[in-house]
Image: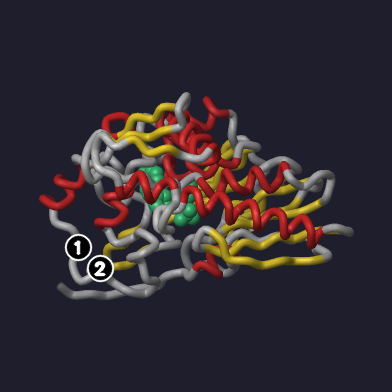
Amino acid sequence: MKKSVLLTVCAITLAACVLSFTACNATSQYFVFGTSLEIDTYGVGGGDYADSVVEYMQSVELAVSAVLEGSDIRRINDASAGESVKCSDVTMELLAAAQRVYELTDGAYDPSVYPLVELWGFSPDKFVAGKVPEKLPTDDEISAVLGKVGFADCFEVDYETATVTKLRDGAELDLGGIAKGFAVSRAVSMADGKKALVNLGGNIGAANGTFKIGVAAPREYSKSYIGIVPLSSGYTMATSGDYEKYYIVDGVRYHHIIDPFTGRPAASGLISVTVVTSDGALGDALATAIMVAGEEKGLQWAQEAGVGLVLVREDTSVSTYNVEYTPS
Ligand code: ADP
Ligand code: MG
């Protein structure tokens, strides 16, 4: 197979994909959820706020990481069918949020997509920026793995007893498409009157101020951003795209957002989706779902959920809904 390739954006660049245009007093940088966390603070007490945010985010990561040994999600993924796994409160909260978006999007956002993410080489333990896999999955492999995907059919979640039971051997959960937005929303609510901007791998949250945020250009462009959106206090902005984690084989781009129905990287005609909402978990997961399902469904769900959208199509034209968007 002729392998061509490849431009892959590293985690640090990912964090810079949405740019703030406001000067701040202090910036703190960390590494959480396999990506960079940047916290801009204004005025006194910023350092303490940043420390408490990173501590909180690390605690969420310890509970819901798909790779960290001993996390709730890792214990679920390592369990056999029929085994009930007791989970922490934060995992149950995230699963409830994930289930809501799974239902809203008719399964386009599916937290049980992990076996496919692994098959395509995009799980955090497998993906290496700039590396092309030795072979692509075959149709038979994809069909076999599709049998282990489908949240409603593969998992039973009991919110009363805080337990998750796998219904099919080999089924696995992945909260990677929702956890960062959830954590950013929580960080915003921890600000306690302080002005701050939190950016966790492209999930941005604004506290006690309005910020102008640049939407990253998904392809080569004269600037690194294609337009600007104001983000008011209490709001979050989540971007999903095909340009963050990907490889190119024989001129075809394979990226990390997987269509749970076809078992292949999403091919909806959209290359970037930004969702603006006060509910960071919803925004994060909805951005992933709209990458899968495309513009028409995206608009429908945005109306139903009352969120704002910036969509970038394959030809790099932009469509917006319910946001103040200024092209750059
Ligand atoms: P980011 O990598 O910036 O967090 P997303 O929020 O779009 O981007 O999340 C993508 C991640 O979510 C993937 O790396 C994968 O772990 C997971 N994922 C991929 N496809 C889906 C899907 N259809 N539903 C739910 N999660 C998905
Ligand atoms: Mg997402």
Q: Position of residue 30 (x, y in %)?
A: 63, 66
Q: Amino acid at mark 1?
A: Leu
Which residue is at 47% across, 24% downward? Answer: 160
Between tags 2 and 1, which lies in front?
1
Residue 290 in view here: yes
Q: In whole angstroms, how far apart are the C-alphas of marks 2 and 1?
A: 9 Å
Q: Disc 2 marks which residue?
A: 249
Q: Amino acid at mark 2?
A: Val
Q: Is residue 159 left or right of residue 293?
A: right
Q: Are marks 2 and 1 in contact (CB under 8 Å)?
A: yes
Element type where label 1 sits in the image: loop
Q: Residue furthest right?
A: 44
Residue 153 occupies quadrant: top left
Q: Disc 1 marks which residue?
A: 136
Closest to the observer, 203 or 71: 71
Q: Is mark 2 within 8 Å of ligand 1?
A: no
Q: Position of residue 289 (x, y in %)?
A: 42, 40
Local packing at callout 1 (Cα closer than 10 Å; few below 14, some 14-19, many 20+) is some
Which residue is at 25% across, 68% downward? Answer: 249
Q: Position of residue 135 (x, y in %)?
A: 18, 67
Q: Is residue 269 left or right of residue 299?
A: left
Q: Is residue 45 left or right of residue 98?
A: right
In the picture, which quadrant includes the C terminus? bottom right
Residue 291 occupies quadrant: top left
Closest to the observer, 240 or 148: 148
Closest to the observer, 98 or 93: 93
